[in-house]
Amino acid sequence: MRTCTWILLALFIVTSASDLFAAAEVHAYRVGKVVTMDGDDRVINNAIVIVTDGKITAVGRSRDVEVPPGATVIEKPQLWLVPGMVECHNHTGGSSPDLHDYIYLTNPGLRTLEAIVPDGVEMERARAGGVTTVLTIPGSGNNMSGFGTILKTAGTGSVEEAVLKAPGSLKIAQAGNPERYFYGVGRSFMNFNTRQTLRKAMEYHKAMTAWEQGELAEEPPKDLHWEEFRALFRRETVASVHTQIYQVLMTTVKMVAGEFGIRTVLDHSTFDAWKVARLVNEDQSIYTINGPRQLHFDRTQRRIMGNAARWWQGGVRQLGINTDSPVVPQEELFYQASMACYYGWTPYEALKGVTRIPAEALMMDHRLGSITVGLDADFCLWTGDPIDPRSSCEMTIIDGHVTYDANGKRVF
Amino acid sequence: MSRVSGSKEPMLPKRMLPKMMLTPRPMVSLVAALVLLFSAQVVPAGESKLALTGGTVMTVSGESIADGVVLIEDGIITAVGTAETEIPYDAMEVDCTGMILAPGFVDPHSSDGLDIPNENLPSAPFVDVFDALDPSRFFFEDSLRNGVTSIHVMQGNNCVVGGVSRIVHPIGLTPHEMSRQAGVALKLSTTPRRGYGRMRQLAELREVFEEYDRWRENLAESRYEQEADKEDDDDTDALPPEESRSQGQELIRDEDLDDQHRHLAHLIDGRLGAWIYCGSATDVAPALALVAERDWKDRAVLVLAGDAHLAIEEIKEAGIDVVLDSDLIHRKRDALTGDVEETFIPDVYRRAGVRFAIQPSRSGAMPERFIGYQAARLVRSGMAPAAALRIVTLGAAEICGIDDRYGSIEVGKIGNIVMWTGDPLDLNSWVQKVFVEGILAYDLEKDARLERLFPEEPEPVEAPAPLDDEGTSEEGEGAKPAEGTPEKTAGEASSEDGEPLEEKSSEKGEAPADKPADPPKESSAAGGE
């Protein structure tokens, strides 16, 4: 027993000492093209990206950037370096039966953090498909199914290492599935009930805020049902709203974003929802994360329409794409973007719609979504434009570590 | 053949779009005709003055005025008169010469504008149609096209208590923009909902109000005690429960009402109407009993269907207004002879002197969709045309309790006016323009869905070519407009001496005499869906 303790202690000292004294881990990626997706929309040919301890520390043309001595240089002059894709609507980061816990029509107090499974076949395929971050949320079998978790797909051992932010969003579902709850519910009751739940949460938040600011003599009792809603009302996290068709999307904008002032992400936003574009434009904090299903057949006009293209034409610029994995497999996020282009959108905007836009939507753009100095080194090396289905992802780097390399074991 | 080419045409958006542009807003060119209509409508009413001049004004409330003037300011009618009526210098004038101006039709009961109406929760007095209103429904657009400008949206025929209704205009991007009056009436039903028997339905309905009464008594008692506690601390004036309950009734404030009971309280204090659905004659008696018991004669309306008119004596005696089902004919088969006896239901109420309204909208049922057609059938059954027009305008507004603002062209009412090409009850008349709150909400000239019904240029009728051999060229001329696109056939006809036409017409092998009348008919079938 005693020797065991000593050995452990010795090991601990050795490892921490090596951490302290070892030089920082530096990698230099020399690639043919970097699509930075940064604020200036820079695309740099013959570029170098320097990664130090999991963060991006330099980006620029090869001749401008000095490779620090001791850096490992990865030479991929034929490949594109593209930010890791961010999936806003994922149901594969946790164990399936636990994620979809449909107890009531609205379930405040549930959170997917309890059900996260950080690695598995789905996560491996996500990495191989260029997806480095996912928001794992519960399903849409009821109107409010719990808080989601933002996690990286690196496949590290523990939940703590994988999780980036929890709660990452509140899942609200307003159409297309919750109607089937129990004996079936109509639109007016669903909206009434969702509003009542949010009102109760708002009241709790206001009472707690009043207490914190010294306006109440007595501390209100803590209630775990409502505790995580506070971040939502402080606009520190977002609501992912499963919403589609005109009537429902309009209600989402008016009720969730308008009445309650919640930062809202319009997930799916399919069918004729694009007709609400003008309303969406009135609140610049709203993000529209379209899909899956990029095509809409408008019965009244008898025309085939591209959802993303219609949103874009309507002036919506904070526009991204999701897969609703496993409805569409996680590794096909790029393919959803391709289809959006097939039906009339533009490839560069579509690529932004699976990288920087979802990162902004989830309020994680200070960590993810672009190749910018200071951000997490989450990126992929592609043989070409990821939106082009002929391109393949050759290497995926998450937090500076190579988590997928097609040279070792090719998945796709 | 021409049907096929007609259905292909809408796939050419570039050709169609310029015609569909209704407003100069930059966004408009990007979205569809439906949204075009909406975006034209969301201009807020206000600061606008509109003078409709030169038309015949059917006021409904009074005499019709030939060459009349209707002035609308900020959405409200401010003057109705003859051509001498003074028009403010800053009013925009719309020339209505040769047209008829009539108040917009009032749709007294419809759930067609809702996305999944609540017919599931049996007792839901707390729900509001607001939360299910779907402004993108084709129903609203079509309402404008058919001259309906105010709609009483209501759900819950299949409930016990079906929630609260509201008055909407068929224009706007959101329910906020469409709603004109919230909380019009609460829907109750004495007809068993699906899966319920009669006893269960009526027991649950009774229980709703029993429970409300108990809840209100307890609330009154606690309110009395709260107020007594405020006034003094000693218990000297502690009253027996009955006493405090009756005194506390007065002390109940609106904020004391909870969601479950708020609308029931509003129904009982008269702020909401009681619209009771009776799907058959059997269901009328319990409805009338409820009305009598609660003394709701002033606010009750029966929404009737099926053979409910068999209870006409009871309805007449109760003196309650009714809203009729869109199916106006009741058919009964004699068990012995097999003869079918048809009853035109409105006649029954007209003869009995019961005030009634007609609900037009049951999407899918063909003629019943058109409220003008329904009113025309009243004329056919012997009602004076003016009275029939009144039924679908002012009469319906009276039954909904909104006749102070809707239903006629009178000073002070909302400027919902329809410009017709002829008499509103004549099915050869078209809705030319619709003004909702003085805003142009619909224009036949710009209705993209009807453009095939009224082609911009009539098909050229060419003089018959010299007869080479009898029949063929004449046949060819006749069949021409029906084949393919007009330009193509015209080119073929001139260059190739009618040969291909001959082939085509021989394919058809139809009598040539009917042909010239065909194309407009066929294109209307393809384009008017």
Image (cartoon, coloured by chain):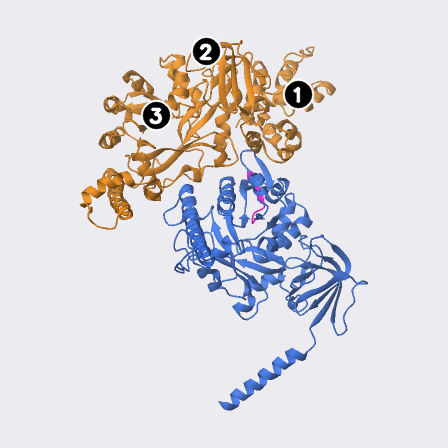
Q: What residue did someone put label 1 on?
A: B501
Residue furthest left in the image: B240
Q: Position of residue A314 (x, y in %)?
A: 61, 40
- Label 2, label 1: how many angstroms apart (C-alpha)? 54 Å
Q: Which mark is residue B342?
A: none
Between B54 and B29, the one lying in front of the other is: B54
- Helix, strand or loop at mark 3: strand
Task: Reply above or below: B158 against A141.
Answer: above
Q: Residues within 10 Å of mark 3 (few under 14, many from 20)?
A: many
Q: Does B41 appear in magenta?
A: no
Q: Residues within 10 Å of mark 1 (few under 14, many from 20)?
A: many
Q: What residue did someone put label 3 on?
A: B324
Q: Are marks 3 and 1 in contact (CB under 8 Å)?
A: no
Q: Which residues are magenta?
A: A291-297
Q: Quadrant of residue B297?
A: top left
Going by the numbered disc 2, the residue's amino acid type is Ser
Q: Depth-wise, is mark 3 or mark 1 nearer the camera?
A: 3
> Which shade of the palette goes to chain A?
blue
